[in-house]
Image (tube, rainbow, N blue to C red):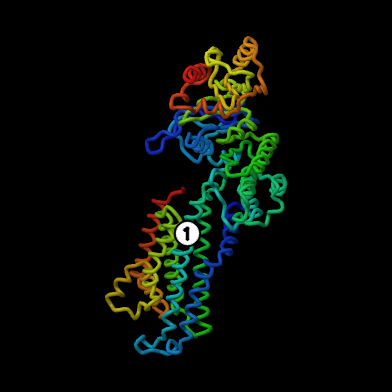
Amino acid sequence: MSASTAVLKSEARLFTREPAALFWVIAFPTLLLTILGLVPSFRTADPALGGLRTVDLYVPVVVLLAVIMAGLQAMPPALTGYRERGILRRMSTTPMRPVYLLAAQIVLNGAAALGSAILAMAVGRLAYGVELPRQLLGYVLALVLATLGALAFGATITALSRTTKISNAVGMAVFFPAMFTVGVWAPVQVMPDLLQRIVGFTPFGAAAQALNQAAAGDWPSWSHLGVTALWTVILIAVAARWFRWE
Amino acid sequence: MAIIEVSGLRKAYGGRPVVDGVSFSVEEGEIFGILGPNGAGKTTTVECVEGLRVPDAGTVRVAGLDPVADHEQVTRILGAQLQESELQEKLTVREALELYSAFYPKPADWRILAERLDLTDRLTARFGKLSGGQKQRLFIALALIGNPRVVVLDELTTGLDPRARRDTWKLIEDVRDSGVTVLLVTHFMEEAQHLCDRVAVINTGRVAALDTPAGLIGRSAHSTVISFTPSRPLGDDDLATLPAVATVERKDGRLVINGTNETVNAVLSLLARHGITAQELRVADATLDAAFLDLTAGPTAGLTTGPEATADLTQQES
């Protein structure tokens, strides 16, 4: 077994030992969708929503909720903890480079987010008959971009926070606006025009609009995809520039 | 042959020199101690040896390799236990040993290491649940897991109870006996005196002295402690004539004189001359503590070494 595989395996095992993170990233988004779907009026078609049901609108919302949970809530404390507790330093005295430990965490959080997204879509489809995205490729592209954006955001929080305490606080401060922009309180479609446009400039608001378009069967607009991609590139650059190993 | 060579090492943080021209070399197979007060630059020095820090000036070689430029090669022959480093809270002992084995091309058998370090019955325990001594034993195991030629142990026994400390010393001796060179950072005199073949005393970023523990004690102004209860009091004048006396203390009629071997003879003849008997006479070698305090006393004490330093201190204090 190669050293990097060993690190990934070990981190995956540790990931399964964090019940709180597992709940919030994997179970909570689907649970939220399930609860909303239990409200009868949310399961009836609404002409104001273009004939869609509220539960239809909430599938992309909880999909993005899973993504920001993983990137903004679960990952930064894990990574700052590794730095703060000297685990990265300990590893740099071995032939293994500590960057693999960070990479393993990023991969695992990304995988958890995508797994959670698939779970939410499956439950939506099976329990409430929510149609699967009609423009599947566009949907996957938007989802992958959003996931990369959230991981890059989390990496930036890690880079700029000296301690786990700070990264928790910053993660929280970013998490609530992010939840707003993905439409947890009110889906983007029902927001007023101006607000929709503003939200469209945020990494996750743009991703929400791209997902909605793909769900409806259109290729997501390049401007939405571009906004999320641009944010991702900037955040990666910031994280790489300011990350400290100790 | 020297396996670690440090020469003219300098490192400053924010303009403040922490290591200021440290040189020493460690021979293969010895336990070499780095002793010094807190903040003396001990940890920074060994971090340069481990390749975790880039020296501002000077050279560091481990088996002829540069720990920074040849970092990966150095990590294969040097195992490290760092001060204040931890592992993932929920990683078990067994998983940690297996994981770190996977990092090395020719690792030691972790089962045998676990056996040697008395961790066999803790293999399924998570790191967060281990006692301080168990954590330290695990770190020793991880430092040894790559079959290194050198291990660097930084403040290994800090925070351990006396029993666990003794056990750890035994382990370090076993490690040395198995052919591994040990670079040991400590601020416990007793530990250095007990374990080290040679000791470099570092003070304010410089090597204040480098010798065997016995040699360090011998060069100290306090190398011998003479204590006794005289049958009748001795006058200050008499005591003042004694050679090489560093300090004289009186407590409950008992005299404690710090000096050298020369002082012992002089005390005995003084007593004989006055016909005084010395009850409960004890003559003991001073511990490394006294030598250490001499070497690290004041800002200038560290700058000179050898007999001059001893003479200076003697004059100051007598």
Classify B48 as above or below A50. above
Question: Which residue is tagged 1?
Answer: A77
Q: Nearer the viewer, residue A164 or B247?
A: B247
Q: Secondary structure at mark 1?
A: helix
Q: Nearer the viewer, residue A133 or A7?
A: A7
Q: Which residue corresponds to the image point at 41% horizontal and 55% vertical from the top-left?
A: A161
Q: What is the residue that sits farthest to the front in this orientation?
A: B232
Q: Residue flagged by tag 1: what amino acid is it?
A: Pro
Q: Which residue corresponds to the image point at 52% horizontal and 47% vertical from the top-left?
A: A89
Q: What is the residue that sits farthest to the left in this orientation?
A: A194
Q: Which residue corresponds to the image point at 58% horizontal and 63% vertical from the top-left?
A: A17
Classify B7 as above or below B94. above
Classify B110 as above or below A207. above
Classify B18 as above or below A127. above
Res B304 seen here: yes
Chain under label 1? A
- x then y, percent, for residue B310: 52, 19
Relative side of A172 to B73, left or right:
left
Residue B231 placement: quadrant: top right
- x then y, percent, for residue B169: 66, 38
Relative side of B269 to B38, left or right:
right
- x then y, percent, for residue A147: 45, 66
